[in-house]
Image: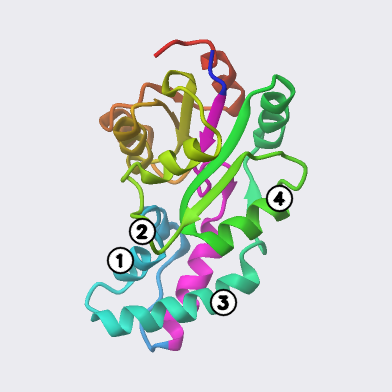
């Protein structure tokens, strides 16, 4: 029986792509660069905000990337909940897990302050045991350190842990952490990416996750 479910944030719990894209386009405009259509950001996000800047403007040098990042945060800190919303069925899933006594946590490559703000805004009544975003002293996913941080705050045998995400990065994170992975198809990446990354399970609705709580691997 799984006792802890760790969720990715962007593309898993919340559809954040419009606000992420708008913030990145704001940064690009401020620096005089061409903007990208919002759907293009589906394939730029997932490895932290600095990597997003590098993908949005691949010919920029390191100091320029730093300036882009500053402009991004300037905008995103104020507008990160404008058009973001939970995916259908996610609030009900979190309520059901909590009712069953299953602990829930968040492990995101979004920087910590934004991760905390968004979770508190959209899920104020969910008792997350750990909410982890990107931190300067810890490598980003797929490095499994973020999962180990969650486990240090809520000790749980790895056989009783499930990691849920929408990308190959998430599936690789789970594999490196030696916990069960569940890939979701409603997020930013196609199901083929999840399967290519050897997801243990692939689901198309949040409620499907419940049926894997009893698996033992």
Marks 3 and 1 close (CB-CB < 8 Å): no
Looking at the rendered structure, the secondary structure element under dot 2 is loop
- Give the residue at x 29% y 34%: 176
Whether residue 8 appears in magenta in the rendering, the answer is yes
Q: CA distance from mark 2 to mark 3?
A: 18 Å
Task: Provide the residue designation for mark 1.
Answer: 55
Question: Left or right: where does residue 12 sit relative to residue 125?
Answer: left
Numbered range of the magenta stretch: 4-30
Task: Provide the residue designation for mark 3.
Answer: 75
Looking at the rendered structure, the secondary structure element under dot 3 is helix
Q: Position of residue 87 (x, y in %)?
A: 62, 41
Say how many tags the image has: 4
Q: Quadrant of residue 127?
A: top right
Marks 2 and 3 close (CB-CB < 8 Å): no
> First in sequence: mark 2 or mark 3?
2
- Viewer-nearest residue: 107 or 33: 107
Looking at the rendered structure, the secondary structure element under dot 4 is helix
CA neighbours of label 1 inside 10 A, class few (<14), some (14 to 19), many (20+): some
Q: CA distance from mark 4 to mark 1?
A: 28 Å
Question: Left or right: where does residue 166 sit relative to residue 59?
Answer: right
Rendered view: 18 above or below 27: above
Marks 4 and 3 close (CB-CB < 8 Å): no
């Amino acid at each position: 029986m799984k006792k802890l479910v760790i969720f990715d944030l962007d593309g898993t719990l919340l559809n954040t792509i419009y606000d992420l894209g708008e913030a990145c386009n704001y940064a690009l405009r401020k620096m005089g660069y061409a903007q990208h259509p919002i759907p293009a950001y589906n394939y730029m996000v997932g490895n932290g905000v600095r990597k997003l800047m590098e993908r949005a403007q691949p010919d920029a040098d390191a100091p320029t990337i730093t300036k882009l990042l500053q402009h991004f945060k300037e905008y995103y800190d104020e507008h990160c909940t404008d058009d973001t919303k939970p995916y259908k069925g996610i609030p009900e899933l979190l309520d059901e897990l909590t009712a069953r006594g299953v602990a829930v946590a968040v492990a995101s490559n979004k920087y910590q302050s934004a991760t905390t703000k968004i979770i508190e805004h959209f899920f104020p009544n969910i008792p997350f045991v750990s909410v982890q975003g990107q931190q300067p002293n810890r490598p980003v996913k797929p490095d499994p350190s973020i999962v180990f941080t969650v486990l240090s705050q809520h000790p749980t045998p790895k056989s009783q842990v499930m990691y849920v995400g929408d990308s190959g990065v998430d599936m690789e994170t789970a594999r490196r952490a030696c916990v069960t992975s569940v890939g979701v198809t409603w997020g930013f990446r196609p199901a083929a990416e999840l399967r290519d990354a050897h997801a243990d399970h692939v689901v198309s609705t949040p409620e499907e996750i419940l049926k894997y709580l009893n698996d033992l691997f």
